[in-house]
Amino acid sequence: MLRTLLKYLIVFGLSLTITTATAQTQSTTSFIVITHATTPVNSVTRSTLSDLFLKRLRTWSNSRVVVVPVNQARRSQIREVFTRTIHRTTVAEIETYWQQQIFSGRNTPPFVKNSDTAIVEFVRTNPGAIGYVRVGTPLGHDVKVLTII
Amino acid sequence: MICAVKLPAPPLTPKLACSSVLPTSEGIVKRAFPALAMAAAMLILLTHRGIAQEELFERLTIHGYLNQAYAWSTQTPILGITKTPRFDYRVLGLQTRYALTEDDEFVVQVRHRQFGNNLLTDLEDDIKLSWAYYAHRFGPIQLKAGRTPVSVGLYNETRFVGTLLPFFRAPVNVYPEGVETIDGVTLTYTSPTVNGWSLQTSVDGGNSAIDDVLQTPTGPVPTRLNIHMVYGGQIRLMTPLQGLGFGFDLHRFDVKNTDGKGIRNRLATFSLDANSRWASIRAEYSAFDLGIIDLDWPAAYVQAGFHFTPAISLNAQYDYSIQKPKITGPEVPMHDRAIGARYAFNPNLVMKYEWHRATGYLMDVYLPPNQPEGRTSYSILSLAVSF
């Protein structure tokens, strides 16, 4: 009986350690914001970035180019870090926001791509596109990094 | 909303321009016309332009929701819920969007609903056209034309989307059968966030109809109220305090009486919405001035939620309405108190249990206003899915 209890305690302790380690890994995942090279801005504020990804801003400032945000996969670490840093809320809250938008007929969520490479490719081929990828992701041509001010 | 009136005796006011039956098949075809036209337009467009399959998948999006319940009442039947527990309590919506460009899209949403032995949902078509509209964006302004949803209060467009609600449906005394859509035009404007403030506004105009069932001394009577003109708007303001917002909307409904004369009716709603990680509070007050039957109909609710974890919350709700004849006659009150538990497996899959205590006269049997009010308790166990 005592042995079984001890076993459960060890398993519990291990899972707690793993969870903590995962949380630490998540918090250190960092991202860069990228856009198509022709986008007429080089920096954005956190609040503007949040509006761009929530589709509250439809066009780039001083132009008629439509903003096309592209998101990372729902369960990805980078999506979680981006949501916490830029929207200052959780991925679940943002999912609920999009459900509200969809079923009240107002808007639809951004496109979703499952990898950094796919995000970079989407941004490269769509003028007006904006996305975020892990630091160190190769960008190639026609893509530039936006500074968050 | 108008025809949900529990008429004080004498039961039916002759001024009320309700037809006594639900739409004929001719009427249904007429009302389904926008969807049929849209489907045809999409088909022509797809065939004509020869859109590649990959491109089609990017342009076409499909969303939906299911709100399925198991419900039972302890005494008087209410909202289609009987003493015999029932599974035939559900709402299902399916939405299809086709984006022509970044700024243009066609949207169609259909709905199926069955609320137990509720006569209205028995008489409705199994699949009913909810929305069918074309939308175009001019920067931050969106124009919708066709059968479009109407923004009234916090919940009008999403009143049955279970994954968005703390209970099975939006508070029934503030959101009875009402104007959910119009055949007309809607303009919405969403502002960017400035110093933490943001604004969402909408204006709309068109015509509509409300189907409902009146409880009369001789039994339930299905009715339709045709509104030849409805127009109004909504303002929702989000504050720099994250999750805190206020709303106000005002709509005018013109209904023709039996003499063909337009009678003015007005609905004003105030709302407060405050959400944090641990708790949420929502409250709304609506004032309905029903000129067509000389009735004032105030209604309100307060909802409070405590979120123990992101997945588990406990909710409580009190909502009421009072129908007050302007000239003479007894008042018809209705109160509903509810508590419930909600478990979200994820934002798209939610399970709920709720218990309600209802008192008043708006139940599934005729209760004369000069007699003691009806009392009943009912429970709803539900599963909500959306995608």
Image: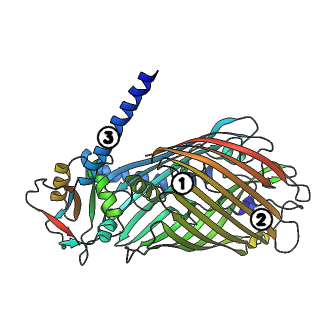
Please identify the quarter of the rendering in which residue A11 is found: top left
- 3D distance between C-alphas at marks 3 and 1: 51 Å
Who's the residue at 75% across and 73% down the image? Answer: B291
Q: Nearer the viewer, residue B330 or B270?
A: B270
Which residue is tagged 1?
A: B130
Q: Nearer the viewer, residue B72 or A84?
A: A84
Q: Is residue A118 visible?
A: yes
Secondary element under disc 3, as helix, strand or loop, is helix
Residue farthest toward the left in the current orientation of the protein: A141
Who's the residue at 88% across and 59% down the image? Answer: B369
Q: Chain of mark 1?
A: B
Which residue is tagged 2?
A: B322
Residue farthest toward the front in the current orientation of the protein: A2
- 3D distance between C-alphas at marks 2 and 1: 29 Å
Q: Nearer the viewer, residue B356 or A77?
A: A77
Please identify the quarter of the rendering in which residue A53 is found: bottom left
User: In the rendering, at what x and y percent does residue B242 appear?
Assistant: 44, 67
Q: Earlier in the sequence, mark 2 or mark 1?
A: 1
Q: Do residues under tags 2 and 1 come within 8 Å of each other at their CB atoms?
A: no
The disc labelled 3 sits on which kind of residue? Thr
Residue A29 - label? none
Q: Quick check: A32 left or right of B267?
A: left
Q: Quick check: A19 left or right of B154?
A: left
- Mark 2: few, some, or many residues within 10 Å (few <14, many ≥20)? some
The disc labelled 2 sits on which kind of residue? Ile
Q: Is residue B151 visible?
A: no
- Mark 1: few, some, or many residues within 10 Å (few <14, many ≥20)? many
Which residue is tagged 3?
A: A17
Q: In which quadrant will I find the N terminus of chain B?
A: bottom right
For the residues beneath circles 2 and 3, the answer to whether they share a chain is: no
Q: Quick check: B326 left or right of B95?
A: right
Residue farthest toward the right in the current orientation of the protein: B370
